Image: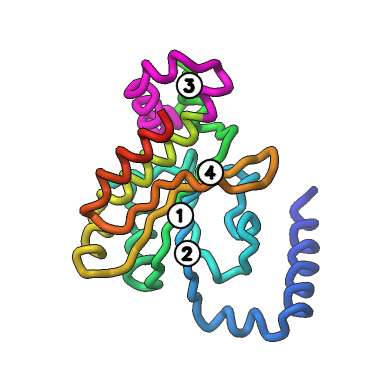
Amino acid sequence: MNIEKLFEQNKIWAEQIEHEHPGFFEELSKQQNPKFLWIGCSDSRVPANQIVNLKPGEVFVHRNIANQVLSNDFNCMSVVQFAIEVLEVEDIIVCGHYGCGGVNAALTRNAHGLVDYWIWNIRNIKNKYSDFFNSLNKSETADKLCELNVIEQVHNLANTKPLKEAWNNKKNINIHGFIYGLNNGLLKNLNTTVSSEKDTEKIYQESLGKLI
């Protein structure tokens, strides 16, 4: 597929949307009013809107390699703050996926260039629970590390300044941890929902206890 084909596909898509929902783009251009913030992986096989069957404008999206939530990532933190303070979303979803390239890279000792600086946190997760991972085979290790990575990122997000300020200001914000199966297209709830600062550590420990 070449670049020109993309424009053709775009035209077909826009015409189809307008046919099914007359006036859709005119209304969409006036404002965005998403109900969810989705923090996911950059993997092209994991498109947020399509996975949950939502139209443009219904989910605010931030994506990076291996769905990391780092307090020193100003891009991610700016997205989170904007979603909470301006868009007033109440549900934030951290979604990983099985077969994640970033997680798989973290499982090797090979050099991967700049991405090694990005996935150091995932390697730390594996080292943190080394006794657990030593009891698993290669496939199980990869899947469980994908799940643990989501739980850790939910915990990281709950401890960031935008979330703490929102909860202190009595805003109703829920953080959820999901994982997506490339082989069946289904989401799995990791049951690690955090809704307040005081419950952060309790939910985190409970989530870990269910997994390892």
Q: Tell me if residue 11 is in the magenta stretch.
A: no
Cα separation, mark 2 vs mark 4, equals: 16 Å
Q: Earlier in the sequence, mark 1 or mark 3?
A: 1
Of badges 1 and 3, nearer the viewer stands 1
Task: Kindly identify which residue carries mark 1.
Answer: 93
Q: Type of residue at label 3?
A: Leu
Asked if marks 1 and 4 touch (Cβ < 8 Å), the reply is: no
| The stretch drawn in magenta includes residue 128 | yes
Residue picked out by circle 3: 107
Residue displayed at 54% across by 23% down:
140
Q: What's the magenta region?
A: 114-143
* Residue that appears at 32% across and 70% down: 85
Above/below status of 102 relative to 192: above
Label ID, residue 44? none
Q: Is residue 86 left or right of residue 36?
A: left
Residue at image coords 78%, 73%: 16
Q: Earlier in the sequence, mark 1 or mark 2?
A: 2
Residue ID for mark 4: 179
Q: Which residue position is annotated with label 2?
A: 36
